[in-house]
């Protein structure tokens, strides 16, 4: 079977969580420790690992039909690509990240206007320059190759850096004064590739399975038995995607309920269900969830 899709996978911090996500979505991808070429268990897909910072350019140019990168790098590269799906995951969590403007805790800077004539270090150079222009601030923006937070105050006056929790900034005694943008991983596609019906269908199928794997990550399935006489009281407080599935047991005075709930609420919900008369409560993991 000939290759249908040339797929770009992110190398670096997103590599491991991306391979894990694809595995949960049903795609097994392997690679050697020094290899830039992944081996897919789907013979219609080929591709390569490249840095997320460069991915959107390669997708726009047609080297890849599609690829995974950050919404921030699509904007930074001003890439003309189609965003097929938002996939909120990163190297350490499944939450939105932010590019923030930060200064030393002791600095007198209160707003971006106070950085007039100063120097800012960042990887996100073009977005930062556009932000300063929008705020009518003239400041020097220099590219940072990494470890940006350690450069203030000795080398630069402020930084624009990516953060999920802000813990690294606080550890380096930095204070956030503004948020430039929120970002997350996105599946982007070449616009010409999306005009090909076979490629478009394949890309959208992959997007659906990745989204389903992420949806399932924060939820669990729940089964329980209870007497019919107690059903109304439990149903009014039992969360579900729509309505729980209800089945009659061999003892017709009892029913079985099955539903999907947020993983984080189960620790409070299960004891409450038990106190309300539920029995045989089973929590089980989900692999994929398509709403």
Image (cartoon, rainbow, N blue to C red):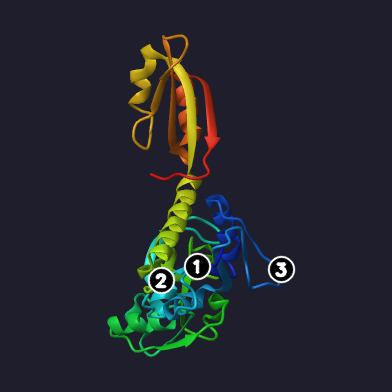
- CA gap, disc 1 and disc 2: 9 Å
Whichever of labels 3 and 2 marks the residue nearer the N terminus, that label is 3
Q: Examine the rendered structure and indicate whether residue 141 appears above or below residue 96.
A: below
Place of residue 121 in the rendered image (x, y in percent of width and height, measured from the top left)? 48, 83
Whichever of labels 1 and 2 marks the residue nearer the N terminus, that label is 1
Place of residue 140 in the rendered image (x, y in percent of width and height, measured from the top left)? 42, 90
Q: Nearer the viewer, mark 3 or mark 2?
A: 2
Rendered-image quadrant of the N terminus: bottom right
- CA gap, disc 3 and disc 1: 23 Å
Place of residue 161 in the rendered image (x, y in percent of width and height, measured from the top left)? 47, 73
Q: Residues within 10 Å of mark 3 (few under 14, many from 20)?
A: few
The answer to whether marks 1 and 2 mark residues whose Cβ atoms lie closer than 8 Å is: yes
Q: Residue at x 54, y 75 (%)?
A: 149
Q: Which residue is mark 2?
A: 193
Examine the image and state in which quarter residue 103 appears. Answer: bottom left
Q: Residue at x 53, y 83 (%)?
A: 144
Nearer the observer, 72 or 274: 72
Q: Nearer the viewer, mark 3 or mark 1?
A: 1
Can see residue 184?
no
Q: Which residue is mark 3?
A: 33
Q: Which residue is mark 1?
A: 5
Count of labels shown?
3
Residue placed furthest toward the right: 33
Q: Which mark is residue 289?
A: none
Q: Is residue 180 left or right of residue 59?
A: left
Can see residue 92?
yes
Place of residue 208 in the rendered image (x, y in percent of width and height, measured from the top left)? 43, 53
Q: Residue at x 50, y 66 (%)?
A: 4
Whichever of labels 3 and 1 marks the residue nearer the N terminus, that label is 1
- Callout 3: SS: loop
């Amino acid at each position: 079977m000939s290759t249908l899709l040339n797929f770009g996978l992110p190398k670096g911090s997103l590599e491991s969580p991306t391979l894990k996500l694809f595995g949960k979505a049903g795609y097994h991808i392997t690679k050697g420790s020094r290899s830039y070429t992944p081996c897919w268990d789907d013979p219609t897909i080929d591709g390569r690992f490249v840095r997320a910072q460069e991915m959107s350019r390669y997708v726009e140019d047609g080297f890849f039909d599609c690829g995974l990168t950050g919404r921030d790098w699509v904007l930074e590269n001003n890439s003309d690509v189609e965003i097929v799906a938002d996939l909120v995951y990163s190297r350490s969590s499944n939450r939105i990240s932010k590019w923030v403007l930060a200064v030393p805790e002791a600095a007198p800077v209160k707003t971006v206007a106070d950085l007039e004539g100063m120097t800012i270090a960042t990887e996100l150079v073009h977005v930062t320059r556009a932000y300063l222009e929008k705020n009518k601030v003239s400041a020097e923006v220099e590219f940072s190759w990494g470890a940006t937070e350690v450069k203030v105050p000795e080398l630069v006056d402020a930084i624009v850096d990516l953060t999920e929790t802000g813990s690294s900034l606080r550890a380096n005694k930095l204070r956030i004064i503004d948020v430039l943008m929120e970002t997350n991983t996105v599946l982007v596609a070449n616009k010409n590739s999306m005009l090909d019906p076979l490629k478009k269908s394949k890309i959208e199928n992959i997007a659906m399975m990745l989204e389903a794997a992420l949806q399932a990550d924060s939820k669990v399935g729940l089964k329980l038995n209870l007497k019919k006489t107690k059903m109304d009281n439990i149903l009014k407080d039992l969360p579900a995607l729509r309505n729980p599935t209800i089945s009659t047991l061999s003892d017709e005075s009892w029913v079985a309920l099955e539903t999907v709930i947020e993983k984080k609420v189960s620790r409070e919900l299960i004891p409450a269900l038990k106190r309300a008369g539920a029995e045989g409560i089973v929590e089980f993991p989900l692999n994929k969830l398509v709403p």
